[in-house]
Image (cartoon, helix red, strand yellow):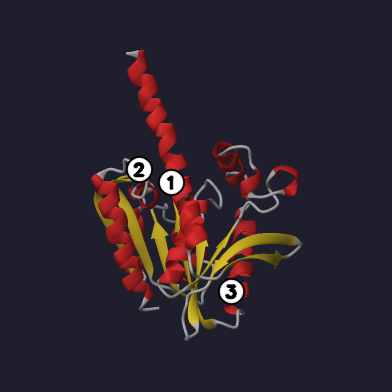
Amino acid sequence: MRPAFVLAASVLAAAPVIAQEDALKRLESSPRHQEWAQVKSGERTVHAFVVFPESKEKAPVVVVIHENRGLTDWVRTVADRLAEAGAIAIAPDLLSGAGPDGGRTKDFASQDAAREAIGKLVPDQVTADLNAVAEYGLKLPAANGKLAVSGFCWGGAQTFRFATNRADLKGAFVFYGTSPADKDAYARIKAPVFGFYGGNDERVNATIAPAVDAMKALGKRYEPVTYDGAGHGFMRAGEEAGATEANRKARDEAWTRWKELLKGI
């Protein structure tokens, strides 16, 4: 039995490596302009990855909030894909200053260490950082003045939360993130909220119905879609070697839906 266990562990360890290599390959071969920005947020500096679309028109800004792993190369590929779809994508590293020696995501020894640091972030600091990044994006000469937010896992929850704190959003795209627990917070939401959820993710999905009820009672737009058989993190998992058919299908359908929704902001 031991050889089988070793083989399984080896396969599991290899998949993220393959995904990492694919992510770097996409970023390095992308024809779109990419740059790193240092955004001031009070006395803090937030490092952010920015990708511009190849377009003759000004474009909307989409803030991309990372998972609880921090700003990984995979999240940066999401920003590149959004720029490919016509948006200016800006992905802040919300672990800026929280890493070893004041570093950021890339400076943590492991993803587990990054997860631990994410759990220590102060909500008001996260909001302030997101507001600073949003303002930076809106002031870019190529921006058309429209702002949206998106996020995954922890970032999905922060996306829903940011919608309760930012009145000028044109859309909030929540990917498998929990809904606000504070019922009063929904009254502050001005933007339509679009949810993308895996069918096998009850930890998150248990928070959908209360959000539906709260938004409906307030006459606000919340459109959750659940993808049967997909697990938590299907947008990332659907790209990895050995992805399940359900995760791959959910990922593809979610991207199609997302791109169509972006056309409407």
Q: CA distance from mark 1 to mark 3?
A: 28 Å
Give the x, y percent position of residue 176.
38, 52
Image quarter in which the C terminus is found: bottom left
Q: Earlier in the sequence, mark 2 or mark 1?
A: 1
Give the x, y percent position of residue 19.
43, 46
Q: Which residue is mark 3?
A: 137
Compared with 88, 72 (above or below) is above
Q: Earlier in the sequence, mark 2 or mark 3?
A: 3
Compared with 229, 135 (above or below) is below
Residue drawn at point x = 66 percent, y = 50 percent:
104
The amino acid type found where label 3 is placed reads: Gly
Label 2 secondary element? loop
Image quarter in which the N terminus is found: top left
What label sits on residue 121 in the rendered view?
none
Give the x, y percent position of residue 194.
36, 65
In the image as oriented, which residue stretches furthest toward the front? 29
Label 3 secondary element? helix
The amino acid type found where label 2 is placed reads: Ala
* Contact between labelled residues 1 and 2, with CB atoms less than 8 Å apart: yes
Q: Earlier in the sequence, mark 1 or mark 3?
A: 1
Q: Which residue is mark 2?
A: 241
Q: CA distance from mark 2 to mark 3?
A: 34 Å
* Contact between labelled residues 3 and 2, with CB atoms less than 8 Å apart: no
Confirm whether residue 155 shows in the render: no
Residue drawn at point x = 73 percent, y = 60 percent:
44
Compared with 37, 104 (above or below) is above
Q: Which residue is mark 1?
A: 19
Residue drawn at point x = 47 percent, y = 54 percent:
25
